[in-house]
């Protein structure tokens, strides 16, 4: 068998069995023997991403492998993907026009590599409109082992309601007219539900803001989505009625379910306690992860979910409605298998209940956007399960410098690898406490920031921190808002810190980087491994930074 036949056979096996690794290894071996740089880059990409799949996100070499992946994709991504990808990229300027940015048009953006994702060397995830998908599905699935699809453009003009208020009436009509102009008026819900290519998907994400319960039900009843393992519904107008089809449709492989309502919607449905109570009646025998975001669920609905057969057995549970108003006593005396937990807007009483629970498997905890204080951080650090945490996110809680000091001096948190206290009213004093921590020396991710117009952090806190043992293993550092006059000095301290030699991701949000400082960042030998850089507003500075980090134009 010659090389071309080997590649053709391996590619066919990859398409027919996208989860098998052996055909990809064979394909990589054949590519590596070819002389052209694109084939060799593709072979390397397959090998690296196979190794990434074997690892966990907290493994030592994870960031380095991700960095190598990013470099390969920046240089060779479109060439590796081939002609179908390039054709869709050319269509993107029409499909996602640039005038569409804003709270009412979050999905109108240019199609980029961020929308297409590679898995084990091949394009496996994509975002596009329903119109594009239906027009090009046969070509896409003939070329790519696509298993993850995010579809927007689901648009049913007949289901839209225009409010009686004149001002909102005009706003709605202008939005609907614009949707008609871009996506047309054809009813594509039925066409999508009967599309056999959906049968290849394992992850389906639908932007359902502009359709209602009946249309979502129609899609969920499709005979072609029975292989879906991850279902994410980005919702808007839907009500509690959407819960019935979720528990009645046949999705035997479903492992991850996300129901996401968006605050930026022109209007929103009311899932509420009724929807949660209906959802709780579902069997979901294979479900491992459930996320509910802003579903307007109160104590009755929350209690029903906790009493269900599946929520206590989940590995991941994210409840992003306000928990401060909930009766968390429902948690007491229960046994939970959660490894990853998110509870938004938690108060002191709720945290006290949480820390008293038996959570022997908990590894990642996200309790952001609440009213927790420094004393609450002491309560958290003393929890019997805190010693198992590898990731802690307390963003947007008023813990202040004292709270960071408590975390920094807690031996029970010594296994933390990821820490986020952004928006927590932390100043240089808190950063100095973190820099002197004898325990938090395993961190690979750190997010520190303050929200404008609160006092920021400056070089007095940044410089000791980036030169301390706490940051010696960092792979990702995010900073937002230095004090108004200290941007350049703080950024220069980061650029000149030998301690940051392992950094692969550097996010400097909301900062004014001068051209001179940009030049220092680009030339820094200590940032040689950084492949993801976000930040900057000055056009001249961005031009300098983009020479080193080409993706900065999409990220700043």
Image (cartoon, grey):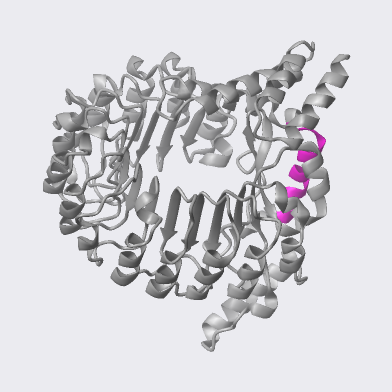
Whether the magenta-drawn stretch holds residue 270 is answered as no
Whether the magenta-drawn stretch holds residue 89 is answered as yes
Q: Quadrant of residue 217?
A: bottom right
Any part of residue 37 in sight: no
Up-down: is 197 above or below 246? Answer: above
In the image, is 403 to the left or to the right of 155?
left
Who is closer to the viewer here, 554 or 74?
74
Any part of residue 108 in sight: yes
Q: Quadrant of residue 443?
A: top left
Report the residue that reaches farthest toward the bottom: 164
Up-down: is 415 above or below 321? Answer: above
Seen at 26% across and 33% down, the residue is 388
Seen at 76% across and 72% down, the residue is 185
Identify the image quadrant of the N terminus.
top right
Question: Residue 339: image x %, image y %?
Answer: 35, 41
Who is closer to the viewer here, 118 or 469?
118
Residue interval drawn in magenta = 81-95
Up-down: is 148 above or below 486? Answer: below
Report the magenta stretch's main SS: helix
Up-down: is 4 above or below 404? Answer: above
Question: Residue 115: image x %, image y %?
Answer: 63, 44
Who is closer to the viewer here, 259 or 307?
307
Question: Residue 104: image x %, image y %?
Answer: 55, 65
Question: Residue 260: image x %, image y %?
Answer: 48, 60
In the image, is 152 to the left or to the right of 82?
left
Q: How many marks?
A: 0
In the image, is 157 to the left or to the right of 36?
left
Q: Quadrant of residue 420?
A: top left
Seen at 37% across and 50% down, the residue is 313
């Amino acid at each position: 068998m010659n090389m071309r036949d080997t590649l053709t056979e391996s590619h066919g096996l990859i398409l027919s069995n996208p989860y098998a690794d052996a055909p990809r290894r064979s394909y990589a071996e054949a590519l590596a023997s070819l002389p052209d740089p694109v084939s060799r880059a593709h072979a390397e990409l397959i090998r690296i991403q196979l190794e990434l799949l074997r690892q966990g996100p907290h493994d030592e070499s994870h960031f380095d492998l991700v960095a190598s992946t990013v470099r390969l994709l920046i240089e060779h991504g479109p060439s590796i993907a081939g002609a179908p990808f390039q054709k869709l990229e050319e269509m993107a300027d029409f499909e996602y026009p640039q005038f569409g940015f804003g709270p009412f048009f979050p999905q109108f953006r240019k199609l980029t590599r961020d929308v297409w994702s590679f898995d084990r060397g091949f394009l496996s995830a994509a975002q596009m409109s329903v119109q594009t998908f239906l027009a090009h599905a046969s070509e896409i699935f003939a070329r790519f082992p696509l298993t993850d699809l995010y579809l927007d453009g689901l648009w049913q003009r007949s289901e839209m309601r225009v409010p009686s208020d004149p001002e909102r009436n005009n706003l709605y009509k202008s939005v609907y007219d614009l949707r008609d102009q871009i996506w047309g008026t054809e009813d594509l819900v039925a066409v999508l539900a009967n599309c056999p290519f959906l049968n290849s998907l394992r992850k389906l994400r639908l932007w359902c803001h502009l359709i209602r319960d009946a249309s979502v039900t129609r899609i969920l009843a499709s005979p072609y989505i029975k292989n879906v393992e991850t279902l994410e519904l980005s919702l808007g107008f839907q009500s509690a009625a959407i819960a019935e089809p979720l528990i009645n449709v046949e999705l035997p492989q479903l492992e991850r379910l996300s129901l996401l309502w968006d605050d930026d919607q022109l209007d929103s449905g009311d899932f509420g306690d009724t929807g949660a109570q209906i959802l709780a009646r579902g069997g979901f025998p294979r479900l491992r992860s459930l996320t509910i975001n802003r579903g307007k669920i109160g104590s009755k609905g929350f209690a029903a979910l906790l009493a269900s057969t599946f929520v206590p057995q989940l590995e991941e549970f994210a409840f992003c409605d306000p928990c401060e108003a909930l009766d968390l006593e429902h948690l007491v005396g229960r046994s939970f298998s959660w490894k990853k937990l998110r509870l938004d807007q938690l108060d002191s009483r709720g945290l006290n209940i949480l820390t008293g629970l038996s959570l022997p498997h908990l590894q990642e905890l996200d309790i952001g956007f609440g009213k927790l204080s420094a004393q609450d951080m002491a309560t958290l650090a003393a929890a019997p399960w805190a010693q198992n945490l590898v990731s802690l996110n307390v963003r947007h809680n008023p813990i202040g410098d004292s709270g960071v000091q408590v975390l920094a001096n807690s031996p029970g948190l010594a296994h933390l690898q990821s820490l986020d206290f952004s928006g927590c009213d932390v100043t240089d004093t808190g950063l100095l406490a973190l820099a002197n921590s004898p325990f938090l020396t395993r961190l690979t991710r750190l997010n520190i920031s303050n929200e404008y117009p609160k006092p920021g952090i400056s070089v007095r806190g940044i410089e000791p921190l980036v030169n301390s043992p706490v940051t010696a293993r960092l792979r990702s550092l995010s900073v937002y808002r230095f004090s108004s006059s200290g941007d350049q000095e703080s950024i220069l301290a980061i650029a000149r810190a030998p301690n940051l030699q392992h950094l692969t991701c550097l996010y400097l949000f909301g900062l004014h980087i001068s051209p001179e400082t940009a030049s220092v960042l680009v030339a820094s030998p200590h940032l040689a491994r950084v492949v993801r850089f976000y930040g900057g507003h000055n056009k001249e500075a961005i031009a300098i930074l983009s020479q080193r980090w080409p993706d900065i134009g999409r990220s700043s």
